[in-house]
Structures are given as C-alpha cells and as structure tokens.
Image (cartoon, helix red, strand yellow):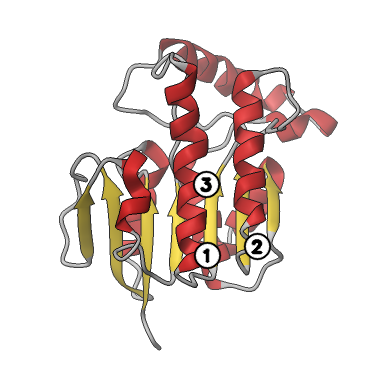
Amino acid sequence: MEQKSAIILGATGLTGSILLNRLVDDDRYRKVKVFSRNHVKRKHEKIEEYLIDLFELEQFGELFKADEVFCCIGSTQKKTPDNDTYRMVDFGIPATAAKLSKHNKIETFQVISAMGADEDSRIFYNRIKGEMEGAVMDQKIKNTYILRPSLIGGNRDENRPFEFIWKKIMNFGDHLLVGKLKKYRSIHPETIVDAMVFLANNEYKSGKIQNDEIKTIAAKETGNND
C-alpha cells in the first residue's frame, strides 16, 4: 500500500487537533504537513510543521503540496470582532487553500463550513461561510467535500462563554430534537473527523454534506451504525 501525505490547516483547533492525531496514527499516511501560527501539541516524525502567517498562505505555494488537504479553519465574531479580519479568516484562508490545491493538482479538498451557510444570508456569519463554499467549489477540485456541521461539542482551550452555555443546553435538549428537527442536533468533533477520514479514503460523491449525513458517513468509518 502506497502511503499518502496530507495538509491540515487549523491543526491547533478542536477538530483539527483530533484530525492530526488520527492521521499520524493512521498507517495510510506517511506525512502530515501543518501550516499554522503556533506549534501543535503533538510531536511525531510524520508531522512537518510550517509556522507562517496564514493570511500570507499564497506565498508558500511551493510547500503546499500533498495528496489531500483538510481545512479546519474557523473563528467566531467574539474572537474576531472586526468583520474584515473575520472574513480574512473564514473566507480568505480556505479560498486561498483551495486555489493552491487546484494549482498543485491536489485532488482531495475538505473544508469545515457550517449549517446555514448561505451567500445570500442577511446573517454575516452564514453569508461568509456561503461565500467561502462558493469560492471552494469554483476551483472544481476532483474530490471536494464541504462539511456543514451543527454546533460542535467538545472542550476548547479558548474561552467561549456563550458557546459553552449553548452546548449545555444542547446536551440536555438534543433528545428533544426529533423528526425534521433532528438535523439540528449537536455533533462531536470526533464524529466530524471520522467522516473526514472516511471521505479521504473511500469513493464518495463530491459536494456539500449536511449534519446528519456527516454522522452517517462517520458511522461507515467506525462501523457503528447504531
């Protein structure tokens, strides 16, 4: 079996750090490139770190080469209150990564978006996510997967008080969301990672993948179909 290489953007974040550990421990991968402002916590010979300003990612095109790209970049308006900076993070970095992937003939590109992403939305957050999705799809990368999770559970290093409170509510209320409302249930970051790993290593139709479908795909990876 020929081993692969992967690039992760956002490997210091909640979902990205879990993904990094999964790929490092996966025998199908020989190298995992990480582009980030800060060092990752995991140390391993497979990991190749590039400490850069992600707003200048385009300048590192020669290094941006692998078999697959996983973009787990994301911010919040509380953490990044300036709308221009927020757009540079949630739109600019994924869009640039997709351009570099296309230019370097990388055939698999995955990016975490959000439920409700819509380029015509009046809600700034949803609109930026929707515009990002459009920019990524415009590159027409062979295997493009845009994951649209609901609220992501788990514990972050950073302080997000509103999100913490909402997660507590969702942990209690998820079981009340049934029928058509089931799609709004929260999702664990490990579930997103399971889905991303499956998509990277199996045939699956390209496109936008909603919260429920993420969970279904993850079950294929873990063999848990409960």
Question: Who comes first in sequence, dot 1 or dot 3?
Answer: 3
Rendering coords of residue 61 (x, y %): 35, 61
Q: Number of callouts in the render?
A: 3
Mark 1–mark 2 CB contact (< 8 Å): yes
Instruction: Indicate the amino acid at tag 3.
Output: Ala
Secondary structure beneath label 2? loop
Instruction: Indicate the amino acid at tag 2.
Output: Lys
* Above-or-below relation of 55 to 35: above
Secondary structure beneath label 1? helix
Q: Residue at x 66, y 54 (%)?
A: 138
User: Residue 199's mark?
Assistant: none
Question: Who comes first in sequence, dot 1 or dot 2?
Answer: 1
Rendering coords of residue 143 (x, y %): 61, 66
Residue where numbered disc 2 is placed: 140
Question: For mark 1, does the 10 Å Cα neighbourhood hold few (<14), some (14 to 19), or many (20 or more) residues?
Answer: some
Which residue is nearer to you in this view: 34 or 217? 34
User: Residue 95's mark?
Assistant: 3
Rendering coords of residue 11 (x, y %): 33, 46
Q: Is residue 17 visible?
A: no
* Above-or-below relation of 143 to 43: below
Drawn side of residue 104 relative to residue 212, left or right: left
Which residue is nearer to you in this view: 69 or 163? 69
